[in-house]
Image: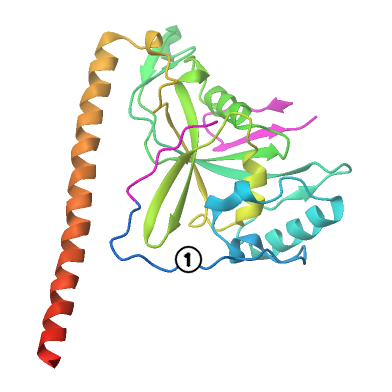
Amino acid sequence: MTWNSTMSSGYSSLEEDSEEYFFTARTSFFKKPSGKVTESKAPIVPLYVLRDVEKDRELRTEFSREEIRQRIELYNSLTKDHLKMTLGHTDAYTGFIQVQMDLRRPVTVRGGQRGREGEAFYLPRGAINTLHVSSINTVKEVIVALLNKFTVADNPAKYALYKRYSREEQVYVCKLADTEKPLFLRLLAGPNLDTLSFVLREQQTGEVMWDAFSIPELRNFLRILDKEEEEQKEAVLRRYNIYRQRLEQALQHVRATL
């Protein structure tokens, strides 16, 4: 497995030769009926039409070569750019994933400017990086490739790859296990980034290696947590205020018709 590391190309190649979850608030005041979706037996039916990405683990994780070929053909017919997938001579296939950088803290870069090493930089938040990967490449390998692209010297264990998806007008974020295969998830979800996208963030679970951070970094992390907590509280309050207004409007309508 090899990868190219460059700061200017905006493109990297990563070619073949119980996890923790972090969700936004998802409880709905108005409970909606949930219909059970039956998976079609026809292999060419797109799974992302039948169900959302959250149910990936409930489906098969292995497919025959013919099923993979048909899914890749369908994927390529739906993509609107040149980031297509290619089936190799074996059951492995290659393709592209796009990862959004969402790092709040500075990273330590090897071989900085003016010959100095260990310089700290803030990577642009929201920047999208495209990686060429294989279906056998794991989340851990993708993280290492991203860090090498920017010559980041930090321990890869500081970072985690998340999948982000939308459902019922809400955005959910879920941490991926190190052994998961991002390109397989991309194939299942289809090329639409609203259905599934990948985000690189600092670790947000109890698996964080706290000894790897300095005291100023830890204090800054606490401030960030306080800020995020307040933002989540405000979001929940806004959401239920809207529900309350709808209930009051519904009550007024009912009373008016009596």
Q: Which residue is drawn at 33% across and 29% down?
A: 104
Examine the residues drawn in magenta and state their main secondary structure.
loop
Q: In this view, does 188 lie above or below 157?
A: below
**Residue 89 falls in image quadrant:** top right
**Residue 149 falls in image quadrant:** top right
Q: Which residues make up the magenta segment? A: 1-25
Q: Is residue 45 above or below residue 189?
A: below
Is residue 142 or residue 227 the one in the foreground? 227
Image coords of residue 214 (percent x, y):
31, 9
Q: Which residue is drawn at 66% across and 34% down?
A: 13
Q: Is residue 101 above or below residue 46?
A: above
Q: Does the magenta stretch include residue 176?
A: no
Q: Which residue is drawn at 51% across and 25% down?
A: 150
Q: Is residue 65 left or right of residue 118?
A: right
The residue that mark 1 highlights is 34
The quadrant of the rendering that contains the N terminus is top right
Q: Is residue 239 left or right of residue 181?
A: left
Give the color scheme: rainbow, by chain, secondary structure or one colour.
Answer: rainbow
The quadrant of the rendering that contains the C terminus is bottom left
Image coords of residue 146 (percent x, y):
55, 29
**Which residue is outermost to the front?**
258
Q: In this view, does 12 lie to the left or right of 168?
A: right
Is residue 2 or residue 167 the one in the foreground? 167
Image coords of residue 87 (percent x, y):
81, 48
Check disc 1 and give the amino acid type: Ser
**Residue 69 falls in image quadrant:** bottom right
Mark 1 closeness class: few <14, some 14–19, many ≥20 residues within 10 Å: few
